[in-house]
Image: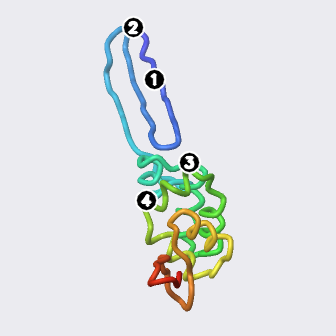
Amino acid sequence: METKTSTNKDDKYTLQCITKGNNIMKIKYKTLTDVKTDYLALSLIDRGLANTRALKIAEGLKNNDWDKITSAICNCDCSNFSLLLEIEPRLIYTAFEKEKCNALKERIEQETNTFYSGGEWLTESTIGDTTF
């Protein structure tokens, strides 16, 4: 009987199946841990973030490149930005604090109905006839 090996890969996992005839001899299932992926990227992808954004964010974090991280966050579409803000809010706020990117500030303000002033994130509140 002939032994066959088939391998399936996606952005997160490698599945390798070795068969002999109709019998499965061995199955290997592992996460990818090469230069392009790491734990954080895989965690973000598992929680629903687009692969492209997750990989860029992880790459930026590996290199302590907050400009790259901020760019990856700003390039998220609306649904991915909302999701990232929900699952990793500290990442977004830290990127803003490190880079002071106006585009990121505006996205945070739109998504959270807060505004940035004097080094703080504030919510709009009304006291009497004054709105601030």
In terms of sequence position, does the residue under pointer 4 or pointer 1 come before the other?
1
Amino acid type at mark 1: Thr
- Report the residue at 56% width, 81% height from top: 116
In terms of sequence position, does the residue under pointer 2 or pointer 4 come before the other?
2
In terms of sequence position, does the residue under pointer 3 or pointer 4 come before the other?
3
Q: Quadrant of the N terminus?
A: top left
Amino acid type at mark 2: Met
Q: Quadrant of residue 30?
A: top left
Q: Which residue is mark 1?
A: 5
Q: Which residue is mark 4?
A: 86
The answer to the question of whether label 1 and label 3 lie on touching residues, with beta carbons closer than 8 A, is no
Q: Secondary structure at mark 1?
A: strand
Q: Which residue is mark 2?
A: 1
The answer to the question of whether label 2 and label 3 lie on touching residues, with beta carbons closer than 8 A, is no
Amino acid type at mark 3: Asn
Q: Secondary structure at mark 4?
A: helix
Q: Nearer the viewer, mark 2 or mark 3?
A: 3
Query: What separation in Å lies between label 3 and label 4 (alpha carbons)?
Result: 17 Å
Q: Residues within 10 Å of mark 1 (few under 14, many from 20)?
A: few
Residue 51, labelled with which disc?
Answer: 3
Left or right, 29 with reference to 4: left
